[in-house]
Amino acid sequence: MVTPPPAPAQPVRPEPPFEIFLSGTPGLEDVLAAEAQALGFADAVAVPGGVTLQGGWPDVWRLNLWCRGATRVLVRLAEFRVLHLAQLDKRARRVDWAAVLGRGRAVSVETTCRKSKVYHAGAATQRIETAMREALGPVESDAAPLQIRARIDDDLCTLSLDSSGEPLHRRGTKLAVGKAPMRETLASMFLDQCGHGKDEPVYDPMCGSGTFVIEAAERALGLAPGRGRDFAFETLPEFDAEAWSGMLAEGRKARPCALRFVGSDRDPGAVQMAGGNGERAGVGDVVTILQRAVSEARPPEGLPGLVMVNPPYGERIGNKKLLFGLYGALGETLKTHFSGWRVGLVTTDTGLARATGLPWLPPGPPVPHGGLKIRLFRTDPLP
Ligand SMILES: C[S@@+](CC[C@H](N)C(=O)[O-])C[C@H]1O[C@@H](n2cnc3c(N)ncnc32)[C@H](O)[C@@H]1O
């Protein structure tokens, strides 16, 4: 009897609950996992480079809308062992690309290979692109490309779809940035690490484009960080525009807030920029931006809260030797006028943090940011 050839495997698509990966900032995975858990994802687990959890498409939309610390939200499409390119070719074809992405879509692939027999990322990318192109048919040239991330690690290939598009620190409201802006995702995680609740004021005496005060104000007002931007998932076949508009309406609803979030900077350009960014973010009513040198910084009236600041770093702007005086002046001002306030300071250099003379708790881990390693220094309430 002749054995019939095996039937071709059915193409697969992710069935909920599938794995969702929040890509994050190395060193801050635990902070991101805690945020995801607070958003209701009890199974969120920190892994190197991010957080994994299980969910369906509405969870993907909700995480993109509400998660403040993640860089991107990825959807795991497939995972398989791969020992050579022909195998990659075959297995990449098993994904039901048309069902997940929709036909006629432009797609780009980014591949990394590590400790694997398939070591040529360019060749691997080409195989995956070919598999997709065959399934998706002719591509609309003006469609923004969706991105697939292929990771081949120890001969295990994972294929993921980037559901975010632009990275999530692009909140969509900040048009103006200064010389060394803090990324919004990092700013929010540093606020978390300082135990910033929804019910305390924040003051940044070197506010630049206003990132810390705007993030803190949005958190207090209960505004979703993704409420003013587009996402890649909005173009996918599984997208439900009606359900999304309900989520978005929730994310745009500000709750009453009697607190003030104050930023100051000596540079008039920065003051104008931070004010404009706050207005565009819709938090202008609770944010005040003042032109002041750091030695003139004074707390707003009311209960003490959190001073959150990233002064200039020597490696990037200005001369480090001159900065010791600036950090000293910051410390002096805070010790003299900010009794009862906690301080969070982000810098590249432990020596500069020490120059403030503030009573630092053990510092946070080094975190990559713009080619540098930065660290969070925190105090308890100042005496
Ligand atoms: C690294 S930037 C802050 C970036 C800001 N966190 C953001 O996200 O855009 C440092 C800021 O300190 C301000 N600055 C420098 N020396 C100052 C001083 N003596 N008094 C007040 N602000 C000062 C600069 O104008 C600059 O905007």
Image (spheres, helix red, strand yellow):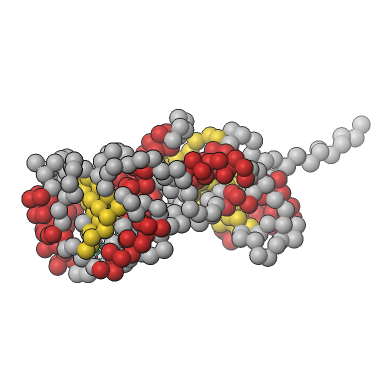
The quadrant the N terminus occupies is: top right
Q: Judge by depth and name the residue closer to the eye, 284 or 191.
A: 284
Left or right: 206, with 13 as reference point = left
| Placement of 380 over or under 355, stated as above or below | above
Q: Is residue 285 visible?
A: yes
> Where residue 25 appears, x then y in whole percent?
39, 49
Residue shown at the point (16%, 60%) measured from the top left: 294
Q: Quadrant of ligand 1?
A: bottom left
Residue shown at the point (54%, 54%) measured from the top left: 230
Residue shown at the point (31%, 57%) measured from the top left: 210
The quadrant the C terminus occupies is: top left
> Where residue 170 appears, x then y in whole percent?
44, 56
> Where residue 55 appears, x then y in whole percent?
55, 35
Q: Judge by depth and name the residue closer to the eye, 234 or 269.
A: 269
Residue shown at the point (25%, 68%) measured from the top left: 268
Q: Judge by depth and name the residue closer to the eye, 17 or 130.
A: 17
Q: Is residue 309 visible?
A: no
> Where residue 206 appears, x then y in whole percent?
23, 59
Left or right: 94, with 27 as reference point = right
